[in-house]
Image: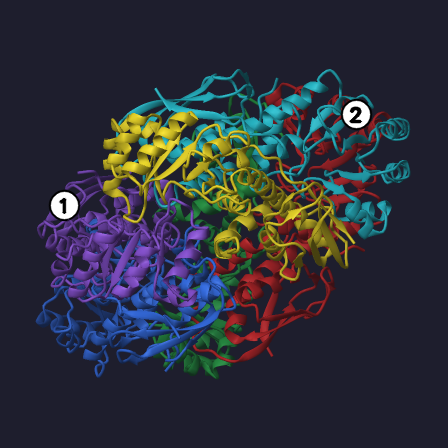
Chain colours: A cyan, B yellow, C red, D green, E purple, F blue
Amino acid sequence: MAPFVLPPWIVLDPLLDSWLREDIGRGDRATAGLTGIRTAQWRVKSAGRIAGLDVAARIFQRLNPTVDFVALVPEGADCEAQTIVAEITGSIGDLLTGERSALNLVMRLSGIATATSLYAAQIADLPTQLVDTRKTTPGLRILEKYATTVGGGISHRQGLDDGAMIKDNHIAAAGGIREAVTLVRESLPYPLTIEVEVESIEQLDVAMECGVEIIMLDNMPVPMMEVAVDACRKHAPHIKLEASGNITLETIRAVAETGVDYISTSAPITRSPWLDLSMRMI
Amino acid sequence: MAPFVLPPWIVLDPLLDSWLREDIGRGDRATAGLTGIRTAQWRVKSAGRIAGLDVAARIFQRLNPTVDFVALVPEGADCEAQTIVAEITGSIGDLLTGERSALNLVMRLSGIATATSLYAAQIADLPTQLVDTRKTTPGLRILEKYATTVGGGISHRQGLDDGAMIKDNHIAAAGGIREAVTLVRESLPYPLTIEVEVESIEQLDVAMECGVEIIMLDNMPVPMMEVAVDACRKHAPHIKLEASGNITLETIRAVAETGVDYISTSAPITRSPWLDLSMRMI
Amino acid sequence: MAPFVLPPWIVLDPLLDSWLREDIGRGDRATAGLTGIRTAQWRVKSAGRIAGLDVAARIFQRLNPTVDFVALVPEGADCEAQTIVAEITGSIGDLLTGERSALNLVMRLSGIATATSLYAAQIADLPTQLVDTRKTTPGLRILEKYATTVGGGISHRQGLDDGAMIKDNHIAAAGGIREAVTLVRESLPYPLTIEVEVESIEQLDVAMECGVEIIMLDNMPVPMMEVAVDACRKHAPHIKLEASGNITLETIRAVAETGVDYISTSAPITRSPWLDLSMRMI
Amino acid sequence: MAPFVLPPWIVLDPLLDSWLREDIGRGDRATAGLTGIRTAQWRVKSAGRIAGLDVAARIFQRLNPTVDFVALVPEGADCEAQTIVAEITGSIGDLLTGERSALNLVMRLSGIATATSLYAAQIADLPTQLVDTRKTTPGLRILEKYATTVGGGISHRQGLDDGAMIKDNHIAAAGGIREAVTLVRESLPYPLTIEVEVESIEQLDVAMECGVEIIMLDNMPVPMMEVAVDACRKHAPHIKLEASGNITLETIRAVAETGVDYISTSAPITRSPWLDLSMRMI
Amino acid sequence: MAPFVLPPWIVLDPLLDSWLREDIGRGDRATAGLTGIRTAQWRVKSAGRIAGLDVAARIFQRLNPTVDFVALVPEGADCEAQTIVAEITGSIGDLLTGERSALNLVMRLSGIATATSLYAAQIADLPTQLVDTRKTTPGLRILEKYATTVGGGISHRQGLDDGAMIKDNHIAAAGGIREAVTLVRESLPYPLTIEVEVESIEQLDVAMECGVEIIMLDNMPVPMMEVAVDACRKHAPHIKLEASGNITLETIRAVAETGVDYISTSAPITRSPWLDLSMRMI
Amino acid sequence: MAPFVLPPWIVLDPLLDSWLREDIGRGDRATAGLTGIRTAQWRVKSAGRIAGLDVAARIFQRLNPTVDFVALVPEGADCEAQTIVAEITGSIGDLLTGERSALNLVMRLSGIATATSLYAAQIADLPTQLVDTRKTTPGLRILEKYATTVGGGISHRQGLDDGAMIKDNHIAAAGGIREAVTLVRESLPYPLTIEVEVESIEQLDVAMECGVEIIMLDNMPVPMMEVAVDACRKHAPHIKLEASGNITLETIRAVAETGVDYISTSAPITRSPWLDLSMRMI
């Protein structure tokens, strides 16, 4: 399996620095005068899939390059409760000052990865893939979508600019699917794709004729979705199909069995609890 | 009741701008060519407490100052499902380009406010107050803690610099509570307070002698907590007492009834689902 | 025709501000003491296609919102020498302080648009479209690619992240086209496309089998390109074909007549002189 | 000869970082999964003068400090086509991710240096020096002016603040050369110089009386320029004379032979093609 | 004694970088061509207390990590005139380019530390402590308050957010001390303290009843201050008392003898001359 | 008289914003709940020259554009103690939140302007002009030098880049004045000037021969300075002469009477107390 892919640090470092500054403010009042090199351990407090260890290591490095962060499990590992996932060695002050920023990030990402893995497990034997959405915490888009991949899903577009999604509001404003697609295509960088959201078989037919690359079946009942998949496979086999709307752990498998290529859901990002971890000196 | 208090925009604007840029990237591919002024409505899809409407308005204003965002419910309102909470009028392009950044923020903050309000309701008739922690999403500290207040809690310190919390790791590193407090006090700006985390009555006694301003009773069973409260009220009535550790909706009332001043829990921030809202043109 | 599409100002403003600061440094030494409101005209000094007027207007607004910039020709107009393209009214100091930053930008973008329009004109009656590359001036990517569209081309991907281009170096590193495509597909956000650069019919065959979305025919002689187009239209009609390498005003039409969908060239951006404009008070 | 002088990296790094971020966006989609250390070579594809190698090295270092960039020719070398100018060793991912930002910069600067060297060669045996102008690409001022020096010219002022240039528009606004000079002198930091643009012998006479440090002979025919030089050498020998306007490779020598101290032209920056370079793994 | 406490570099580096950029601008014109490694010495030119050496070292490191800055006296040392306080070894260019930014900072901080130490010496045998105010140079708050601690004082709050100071204007706006305190308490993060400024015994009585943590006796004559201290010690022994207003080297001891806990004065920051230092190569 | 010249706001705004953020931190704890529009007055508490009122107005505007700041005296006015210099109308919260940042700036700048005016008054009837140095508070260079001009001096160069000052350390490193000047001249943008620091008549002679534009007579006794002025006026009348070193209010006139063009001193910036101002609601 390919490793999970983070962007280069030059992209992430400004975020990491801003998080440290957010927490530290004008200085850490509680570490003044503490001295010595210590080692701390990170322990997960309940079972879950770990995500973000490399980012945590980098957070400590941004605080002080001499901190040594050693991950004890691979990224994406499914950990039992009480697993020690990392050992961090450095000055006691650096360990305590960087602790919360680093832990908060890993707890949030691991919560997403854990929830994603539960959804992905439901359809693991089917060709359908689980994808995320643009419902992400402001400021954390890249890393929350990274957690999706650690959880076993793949990412949807990252923003408004690396793909064109034409939704109901766009269609209404343009005066129809055909008009909306035409407007978008005129100014779209050519390698980018167009996805259209459809709510009926009639809309599906129009979308197929427009030559879009992806069609999202939005909130369709499963039987209608089956009709849609059949129609599209017959008339426009190169178009990718994405199902969306009210996906739950209970419903996801039935949706996947319709044969759609992708199922998108925001739930692992918008509804998942953080995975609890704690740090303790050894 | 005093209004909920956001910091001046000059503090928040850089965050808001970064969120818009995160989502927009190099441009919104789907709104090219759409023209006209439209009005959109925001609707909550399940019951909950709304938070962040002023921030959402500002997000649209940062995108284009001509967008007019009208909140239809007051900040902190408990809304039924399907309540329309805001109407936004502006160019169709601005409405669609700003939609997700603004909605994501309000959905996240409202999720926190909603969860917080459930915890706060359990102890509303008692003098004990609910407080948050530093377990917040990296980059969203100020606003997530603001959501705590909308939910009926009050905020703990905002970072490492506006209060000194001496925890187990600090105590171990310093060689004891007394030593840790002494070290901190030497360099602490004088209006700031020191809080010490204690896990036993013995530690409590030391902490009281050290003249700290706040003592956190960490993970104490309720009976031990009752002993602690009694001891502290008798010997050090000016010290504030905070209970922490494994607070749930089921246990919070019993903890409050011990008479502690504050109960801190990260659950409304780390374990709450977002409140779902959607935008539709009218 | 749809209007040319700039990203929202919140994306561009930091660039514009940095340009003003680059030129102004610690202050404009030559405008001290000059007073009064004046109107200036911008005149093109040789024939060409104008691009960037809205950006110029915004540059003056960033310097001082009271400056009034009125474009006298539409964006993308082909202007004769001596055409007055804009009138700008404001305090004499603001006009002179902002002049060079605004002019430099428009001269550069108009130079690109002018050159692009010459290439595009050669193939205007054919379905093939002209596209740009990632050879752009550091810091000006978005706006130089915008100038491509004003010149009559369409944009290729904007960066390393909104499309995957697999070139000779990637293929060599991965051990083959097939291996390279597989590696990329594993972590690619699903709406994004993969383009592979091929230099022979054998490579083309492999690329078609790999299910990529775009194939670039790199530096192929026209006869080989014709073979390639035929093969691809027959076996993989949904794959887009791009021709690249040593495109000149003389050769572009013959390349287009092979039936490729896109011809990419960096020449309008890397080899075009600026369109000269000057400002004078009236 | 003194080495060409770049400002300290602390001045340039923010630019370099912004260029990497511009190209990388949210991540490089094509290098995921590529592993191993490789060496790449940079080859110039046509003859020209190389400029910017140290900056290219720094760009790779900002991406990853472990990349080793070895220049094989000295900065400012006149290279034959196919010369290998640098070897770069690092992880295959870093080489490919940083390639375009680094190459674009060097191609642009080398194009300027090459064009500048052609102009400078025309007057190399005369005391007159070639200088650039403020017509530079927004955001690249410092480095484009650096390329001027690599090309054999010297730089004019860097911005509006390190010298006062009084041009026709300033003169008109102030009501005359004398008035304009007086206004500027009053607030000018005292080590800074004043340059006045004159278009006639009458204006020259006034400028000489005003005690300015530099006079620009703007668009004067060569015979008038000869008169101007004579007059100035006789009456104000400490004033430096700069010729400007419509300088070409054909006309520059005749202008220099009038005896002016400096000839300024924007052509090497606004009209030069980039020097083409390519990178290939070895 | 605990060491003086600076915040982590990640907090300060942006400031340090901005200072270097402020001085360097587009490049150091006077160091071009200078080569070789040299050692420079910093000498204090009059007696005083040195502060900021670690920051100076970091400034040079930000310019070039190879510069080696060796402090020859401990931070906070009281130096005779002509004491050599540091030796700095590095390239001659780096030493000269970084010299002024680093020296300016240390001269300013040492001036504050020196002045502070004079005030602190007046009350060194008394329990009263000297504190600073928010009258600090814009942009230097953290470091000027750090200099206070080097001078022997302790810091007051660092900004508007880590403590609530209710002054005459707040009281007037709220309609009274009681109303002002109530308003503030409602939204105050709970570990933060409230300080109220009082000008009379009547106001003192109200403030004591309001349960504030600190009371500032503003501009009170010493006899009134004695009454105030007595009243507060008797009725509200946990409230800290701060004296403020027209504190001079002559008056400070009498004020301290009233028994107040803290005496605040802006004089060491707003009225102190810089301590002169110079750098010379050896 | 020409007005005092500030750079455009686009240059200063980032500084102003950073000062507000420095003081506000995460929010103003003391203004929560205060409502209503109020007017405040600024009063100088001792006599002095006022500087920075436009900057103060802008600071309030950056906080909230609706604040109305009305200066009641012109910039540079010499005010008696108790003069009301400005009235500011706005929401009570904005007035109190912005108060300290704005006041601190004006107090600092006015302190400099006041001290400068005292030095300037000593030589007001002589042609010699008072100039400042690069000994300025890190981060405040532009504005402290602006205050010099309000005080009646003129500014020296603003940084290392808008003039070349060759000092003893440069001369030693280069191997002599002549060598140092030659090195600098080679890479100097041509409108910039070179100033050389000399300590003896022998050095003066060399400097005159090198064709520098300015010579600084460093720490010369007045009789030696007279010899230097005579020599320079006779042999190199176009060279400007600057006296420097140990200038005091007592010595400045004697130095000016030697006939030097400029006297530079850092004292008004490094040794001046702030001018005290206070704000009160009316």
Identify which amino acid the numbered label 1 is placed on.
Answer: Ala
Residue in front for this viewpoint, D102 or C121 = D102
Identify which amino acid the numbered label 2 is placed on.
Answer: Val
Residue in front for this viewpoint, A38 or E68 = A38
Residue in front for this viewpoint, C88 or D275 = C88
Disc 1 sits on a residue from what chain?
A: E
Left or right of F223? Residue A181 is right
Q: Is residue E195 above or below residue C204?
A: below
Location of residue F223 in the rendering, given as x and y in whole percent from the top left corner? 8, 72
2 vs 1, front mark: 2
Q: Is residue B120 visible?
A: yes
**Quadrant of the image containing the C terminus of chain B:** bottom right
Q: Quadrant of residue A189?
A: top right
Residue in front for this viewpoint, C49 or A176 = A176
Location of residue C124 in the rendering, given as x and y in whole percent from the top left corner? 82, 50
Location of residue A200 in the rendering, given as x and y in whole percent from the top left corner? 87, 37
- Report helix, strand or loop for mark 1: loop
Q: How far apart are the alpha carbons under marks 2 and 1?
A: 74 Å
Residue at x-position 45% and y-position 36%: B263
Left or right of A115? Residue D163 is left
Disc 2 sits on a residue from what chain?
A: A
The residue carrying mark 1 is E77
Location of residue B238 in the rendering, given as x and y in whole percent from the top left corner? 31, 43
The residue carrying mark 2 is A255
Q: Is residue F223 above or below residue C22?
A: below
Q: How many marks?
A: 2
Question: How many residues crowd around disc 2 within 10 Å: few (fewer than 14), some, or many (20 or more)?
Answer: many
Q: Judge if badges 2 and 1 mark residues of a common chain.
A: no
Q: Quadrant of residue B81?
A: top right
